[in-house]
Image (cartoon, rainbow, N blue to C red):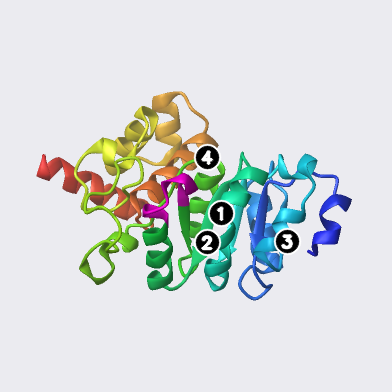
């Protein structure tokens, strides 16, 4: 969607994707809107276009997802984006870990930029939507592969990742993944092989809420599905 159309849309804008239709397709935007019914998605072609959005619309934006092809442009305007979109999380959508590493290195030496999250674009649709949902809740997300690519974190990053952003399965403590008490309960029951309906009854929750917790757990642990999350849980129990 062109910038000139930003102010024609009456529905609150939750997420702006910056890139071309090949990387952020109309189908992908519709999937996000279906997964997050409180969100309306838009697409614009360039990072600088965002700076032209009227303030009344900018205050509605909660996520800005920028394609890796525009990472250099993103780096140049991060301070301005923070000023124009004080409530929005800034996210790099990447397929090439080296590009994400370069941005991470720059962010590490520029703490004023604030947290930047990283959205892998080469994962399954379910996993991708899980991460988007996690980001929409205001969480900061870094995929585990960015800590393990080439066997080490990017050179400019500290050797120990901050606890609130660590998502590598090799981490051994609960706080490293920032799982909530409820997520821990859901994960425990899931690891015992209980289905969502049983977990919902045990915790006095709806099945939809249990499913949402599992989406968050999978995204936070950096795994691909429920089975891998259960394996991680059992592996932690053995290590401890």
Of the residues under marks 3 and 2, which one precedes in the sequence? 3
Of the residues under marks 1 and 4, which one precedes in the sequence? 1
What quarter of the picture does the N terminus occupy? bottom right
**Would residue 165 be visible to someone looking at this image?**
yes
Q: Provide the residue designation for mark 4.
A: 138
Q: Residue at x 24, y 44 (%)?
A: 233
The one nearer the camera, 203 or 127, is 127
Which label sits on residue 49? 3
Which label sits on residue 235? none
Q: CA–CA distance between discs 3 and 2?
A: 15 Å
Of the residues under marks 3 and 4, which one precedes in the sequence? 3
Please report the bounds of the magenta region as a residue range: 107-116
Q: Provide the residue designation for mark 1.
A: 78
What quarter of the picture does the C terminus occupy? top left
- Placement of 181 over or under 131, stated as above or below: above
Mark 4 neighbour density, 10 Å: few (under 14) some (14–19) many (20 or more): few
Residue contact between numbered discs 1 and 2, judged by CB atoms under 8 Å: yes
Q: CA–CA distance between discs 3 and 1?
A: 13 Å
Of the residues under marks 4 and 2, which one precedes in the sequence? 2
Q: CA–CA distance between discs 1 and 2?
A: 6 Å
Give the quarter of the image for residue 67: bottom right
Which label lies toward us, 1 or 4?
1
What percent of the width, then of the height, locates residue 102?
Answer: 40, 67
Give SS at disc 1: helix
- Placement of 154 over or under 227, stated as above or below: below
Give the quarter of the image for residue 60: top right
């Amino acid at each position: 969607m062109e910038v000139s159309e930003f102010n024609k849309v009456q529905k609150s804008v939750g997420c702006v994707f910056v890139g071309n239709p090949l990387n952020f397709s109309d189908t992908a935007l519709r999937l996000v809107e279906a997964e997050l019914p409180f969100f309306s998605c838009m697409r614009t072609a360039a990072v600088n276009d965002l700076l032209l959005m009227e303030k009344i619309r900018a205050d509605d934006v909660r996520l800005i997802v920028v394609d890796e092809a525009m990472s250099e442009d993103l780096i140049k305007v991060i301070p301005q984006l923070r000023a124009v979109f004080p409530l929005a999380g800034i996210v790099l959508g990447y397929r090439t870990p080296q590009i994400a590493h370069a941005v991470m290195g720059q962010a590490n030496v520029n703490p004023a930029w604030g947290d930047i999250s990283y959205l892998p674009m080469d994962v399954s649709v379910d996993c991708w939507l899980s991460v988007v949902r996690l980001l929409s809740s205001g969480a900061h997300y870094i995929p585990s592969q960015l800590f393990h690519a080439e066997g080490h974190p990017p050179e400019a990053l500290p050797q120990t990742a901050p606890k609130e952003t660590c998502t590598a399965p090799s981490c051994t403590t609960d706080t490293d993944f920032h799982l909530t008490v409820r997520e821990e309960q859901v994960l425990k029951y899931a690891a015992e092989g209980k289905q969502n309906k049983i977990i919902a009854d045990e915790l006095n929750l709806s099945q939809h809420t249990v499913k949402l917790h599992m989406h968050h757990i999978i995204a936070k642990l950096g795994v691909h599905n429920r089975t891998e999350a259960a394996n991680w849980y059992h592996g932690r129990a053995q290590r401890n």
